[in-house]
Structures are given as C-alpha cells and as structure tokens.
Image (cartoon, rainbow, N blue to C red):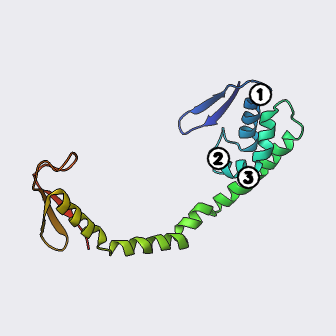
Amino acid sequence: MVVWIVSARRNDIQIHVPYLEKTAQSVLVRWYHEGLDAFEHTCPTGRAIYDSAYASLINYLAAPEETDGFDDLIKSCREQHEALKAQLEQGRDRLLEIHSNGGEKAQQLAQSIEEQDDDTNLIAFAMNLFDIVGINQDDRGDNLIVADAVRPHVGAGFPRPAGRRLYYHV
C-alpha cells in the first residue's frame, strides 16, 4: 500500500492506495503517480496523455512483470503532463478556446435554432393535433392559447377539462 499526504486548506489528506505488487494495479498506481501526478494534484491532462500512451500502457498492464522501458514511458508521460499543464496555466485551454467565441459550429447551430424559432409549423401541428384528440383551443393573442379538453375521455396522459395555458412565442 502507498500513502500520500496531500495538503488541504485545513488538514492534510492521507490517500491510501492499496495494490498488489507486480500486477496491472501496480503499473497503474505508478503511472498515475509518477507519470501524471494524479494523486497529489488534479490532472486535467490525463485523458490526452492516456490517448497518446494507450498502446504502450496496455502492453505493460497486460504483462506487469515486464518493466523494460516502463521508466521511459513514465518519463515521457511526465514530460507531456508538465508541458500540457504549462499550456493550461497560460490560458491555452483548448476547450476554452474552442467554445469561448462559439466557433463556427456554434454559430451555425444558433442560426439553425433561430430559423426554427421563426417557423410556425410546430404551432400548426399542435393545433391540428388538438382538433384530432378533442382539445378545444382559444386563441387569446399573439402569444397565448388556452387549451381545454372538450371530451374528458381523450386518453391517458391528457389533462382533464380544467384548462391549460400554452404559450407560443412567434
């Protein structure tokens, strides 16, 4: 078992990580700790490093007693971790960059939503459906329709004849 003591705001936190020697568990513990520093700090770089080291890491997990070259993998992962962490600290968070201005895809999505907002097909569909299932509609203006169930037997899940207000913003 390995114990790390991590400083917190009020008290130190002791992290106990039990594992079996010369198993895939020991490979992962070492990779998390030495390669990613994941036990003592948050690890925002973990997924990116895992993706790049996947093939090698899987080989060591499959044969944990074969440690030739594992130190090099750990060193490489640690270097990648430090480099990516430095980029994040400099404000180059890739996700933040992609989503901070919305990007082209976000602009296209917003445009598509805006076009659908102006479409009255949903309102026409709902009015037609209400007619078919026996729900009376009373148009009370540009943005307000009051719906009343004319027949109380219109089916399970429909409101009872108490009147429900449906708002459409057109």
* Residue at 64% over, 47% down: 43
* Residue at 62% over, 45% down: 42
Residue 68, visible in the rendered structure:
yes
Residue 166, how many percent across, how many down?
Answer: 20, 61
| Rendered view: 82 above or below 144 | above
Label 1, on which residue? 23
| Rendered view: 167 above or below 60 | below
Residue type at the position of mark 1: Thr
Image check: 5 left or right of 71? left
CA gap, disc 1 to disc 3?
A: 27 Å
Dot label at residue 43: 2
* Residue at 44% over, 75% down: 111
* Front residue of 54 and 10: 54
* Front residue of 131 and 34: 131
Dot label at residue 82: 3
Image check: 44 left or right of 112? right
CA gap, disc 1 to disc 2?
A: 23 Å
- Dot 3 surroundings within 10 Å: few (below 14), some, or many (20 or more)? some
Label 1 vs 3, first from the N-terminus: 1
Task: Tell whether label 2 touches label 3 (CB within 8 Å).
Answer: no
Observer-side mark, 1 or 2, equals 1
Task: Tell whether label 3 touches label 1 (CB within 8 Å).
Answer: no
> Quadrant of the image for the C terminus?
bottom left
Q: Check disc 3 and report its element: helix, strand or loop.
A: helix
Image check: 126 left or right of 93? left
* Front residue of 34 and 170: 170
Residue type at the position of mark 2: Cys
Residue 78, visible in the rendered structure:
no
Label 1 vs 2, first from the N-terminus: 1
